[in-house]
Image (cartoon, rainbow, N blue to C red):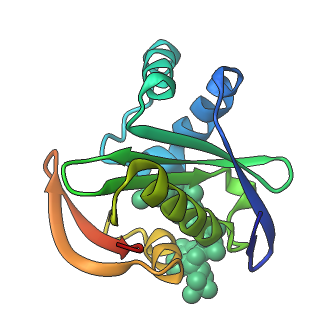
Amino acid sequence: MIAGRGGSVRLRRAEAADCAFVWNVNNEPSVRAQSIRSAPIPFEDHAAWFARKLADANALLWVAEAPEAVGVVRCDKAAAGAEISLALTPGARGRGLGAAMIAAASAAAAEALGVSVVVALVRPENQASLRAFARAGFSPAGREAREGVALERLEWRGPA
Ligand SMILES: CC(C)(COP(=O)(O)OP(=O)(O)OC[C@H]1O[C@@H](n2cnc3c(N)ncnc32)[C@H](O)[C@@H]1OP(=O)(O)O)[C@@H](O)C(=O)NCCC(=O)NCCS
């Protein structure tokens, strides 16, 4: 259980029964708008992706509870370190839960995936995300293009 500014949030590993919740969170228009691929996600595509992620030892997917399910956070092992992404349901934003989720997931990913760096790639206009990552201890590390989208790179370094 991690305390955010506006309450506590708990991360639990996602399971098969969370498929529709995760789709709803990630398919919400304001979340698509901040993603690298902004098109809506067909449920069938999501279900196949979700099953792959649950089976992937290099991927960690959590549901955040406060105490009801309020969001999703994911860490994927990458070439150097792990990459993190997250989203909250619209009604759960603005309470500091995002920073608490980022801090908890980064520490857990560093340990479980055996990495010392966690990387976030954020659209430069996504101020809420940039500030949530900064509050969770991430530092700016330049710009990076992904699929033709210019993104801010932020890094967190855990215990070596
Ligand atoms: C990004 C996200 C996880 C942030 O979590 P959150 O708990 O809502 O974060 P908060 O509302 O506490 O905001 C964090 C900071 O951003 C600020 N902020 C919030 N909305 C803002 C806005 N529209 N413009 C500028 N600053 C904003 C807050 O004041 C806060 O600042 P502080 O830490 O200096 O006090 C959440 O907004 C979300 O799910 N967004 C949609 C999906 C998304 O963008 N995911 C990240 C992709 S990289």
34 or 73, nearer to the observer: 73
Q: Position of residue 97 (x, y in %)?
A: 68, 67
Classify the position of the N terminus by image quarter.
bottom right
Name the image quarter holding residue 143: bottom left
Name the image quarter holding residue 119: bottom left
Q: Is residue 136 left or right of residue 155?
A: right
Q: Position of residue 117 (x, y in %)?
A: 32, 66
Q: Residue at x 33, y 54 (%)?
A: 82
Q: Residue at x 51, y 26 (%)?
A: 54
Q: Position of residue 50 (x, y in %)?
A: 50, 24
Q: Is residue 63 left or right of residue 26?
A: right
Q: Position of residue 26 (x, y in %)?
A: 53, 39
Classify the position of the C terminus by image quarter.
bottom left
94 or 14, nearer to the observer: 14
Q: Residue at x 52, y 64 (%)?
A: 107
Please give the count of numbered marks on the rendered protein.
0
Name the image quarter holding residue 122: bottom left
Ligand 1 located in image quadrant: bottom right
